[in-house]
Image (cartoon, rainbow, N blue to C red):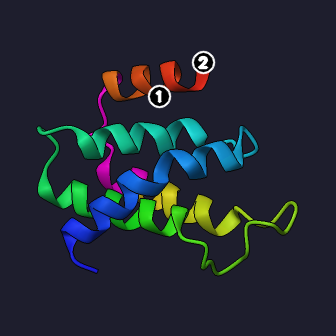
Amino acid sequence: MDENQKLQFIKSNFWKKIKETGKKIPFLKDVIAMYYCLMDETTSLTAKTSIALALVYFISPIDAIPDVILGLGFTDDAGVIATTLLIIKSQLKPEHYTKANESLSN
C-alpha cells in the first residue's frame, strides 16, 4: 500500500472505526489528535508517514490481538499509538487536541 492508498484508506475508514470503538479506549483523544495532525499541511512527511502507519494498524480489522477480546483487544493498538506519539510529539499541536476534544463532544 503506497502513501496515497494509506491516506485514502484512513480517510474512508477512520470515523467509522472511531464510532465502532465508542469511548471504550482510553487513548481515543490521542488517536483523533493524530488524525488531525496527519491532515495538517505543516506536519512533516516523516511524522505523517509514522501517523499513517499507526492509523492504518488501528483501523485495520487484522490485528495481533483481535479488538473484540474484552480487556485485551486494544492493547496492541495502544502500544502502536503510544510509540507513534513518542516519535511525533513535536508535531502534535494544541489545536490538534482541541479538534479532537470537539470531535469527542459531538
- Along the viewing direction, whichever of 105 and 49 lies nearer the viewer: 105
Residue 24 relative to residue 52: left or right: right
Q: Which mark sits nearer the N-terminus, 2 or 1?
A: 1
Q: Which residue is mark 1?
A: 100
In magenta stretch: residue 90: yes
Look at the image and tell me in which quarter the N terminus lies.
bottom left
What percent of the width, then of the height, locates residue 84?
Answer: 40, 58
What percent of the width, then of the height, locates residue 69?
Answer: 84, 69
* Crowd class of label 2 (few under 14; some 14 to 19; many from 20; radius 10 Å): few
Residue at point 47% right, 56% down? Answer: 13
Q: Which residue is mark 2?
A: 105
Residue 2 relative to residue 88: left or right: left
What percent of the width, then of the height, locates residue 77?
Answer: 60, 63
Residue 90 seen in the figure = no
- Along the viewing direction, whichever of 10 and 86 lies nearer the viewer: 10
Q: Amino acid at mark 1?
A: Ala
Q: Quadrant of residue 35?
A: top left
Residue 11 relative to residue 43: left or right: right
Instruction: Give the CA distance from mark 2 to mark 1.
Output: 9 Å
- Along the viewing direction, whichever of 89 and 24 lies nearer the viewer: 24
In magenta stretch: residue 26: no
Point out the stretch of residues depicted in magenta. Answer: 85-94
